[in-house]
């Protein structure tokens, strides 16, 4: 009987851990998608700036080095 109770407690803990891990993976996936979207937006801004201001292409690597 004690074994069954201990097993149920352990099973409950494993279920809670699995739920926690699932929640964290879901949050990480959401954050990763947001980062991917931001990366795409930055690429678009760089292309736009390169077209409007041609000197941007040559100055941008120097700007990044200073950061």
Image (tube, grey):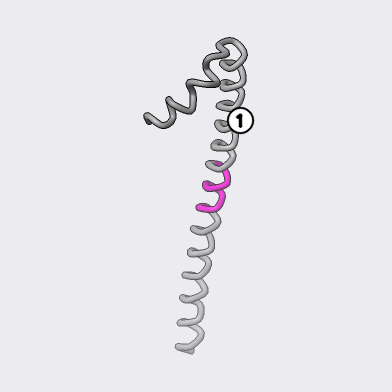
Boundaries of the magenta span: 23-30
Residue 14 in picture, x, y percent from top left:
50, 70
Left or right, 20 with reference to 54: left
Q: Above or below — where is 13 with respect to 40?
A: below
Q: Quadrant of residue 50?
A: top right
Left or right, 46 with reference to 5: right
Q: Residue at x 50, y 77 (%)?
A: 8
Q: How many marks?
A: 1
The one nearer the camera, 3 or 45, is: 45
Q: Residue at x 61, y 21 (%)?
A: 47
Residue 3 in picture, x, y percent from top left:
48, 88
Question: Which secondary structure lies at badge 1?
Answer: helix
Q: Above or below — where is 45 with respect to 36?
A: above
Outermost top residue:
52
Which secondary structure dominates the residues rendered in magenta? helix
The one nearer the camera, 11 or 59, is: 59
Q: Which residue is mark 1?
A: 40
- Taking the magenta stretch, the answer to whether it contains residue 27 is yes
The one nearer the camera, 25 or 67, is: 67
Q: Residue at x 48, y 64 (%)?
A: 17
Outermost left residue:
66
Residue 2 in picture, x, y percent from top left:
45, 88
Residue 40 in picture, x, y percent from top left:
61, 30
Quadrant including the C terminus: top left
Q: Above or below — where is 42 with respect to 13?
A: above
Q: Residue at x 51, y 59 (%)?
A: 21
Q: Residues within 10 Å of mark 1 (few under 14, many from 20)?
A: few
């Amino acid at each position: 009987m004690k074994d069954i109770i201990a097993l149920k407690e352990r099973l409950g803990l494993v279920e809670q851990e699995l739920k926690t891990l699932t929640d964290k993976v879901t949050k990480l996936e959401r954050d990763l998608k947001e980062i991917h979207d931001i990366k795409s937006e930055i690429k678009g801004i760089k292309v736009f700036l390169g077209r409007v201001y041609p000197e941007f292409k040559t100055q941008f690597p120097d700007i990044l080095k200073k950061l």
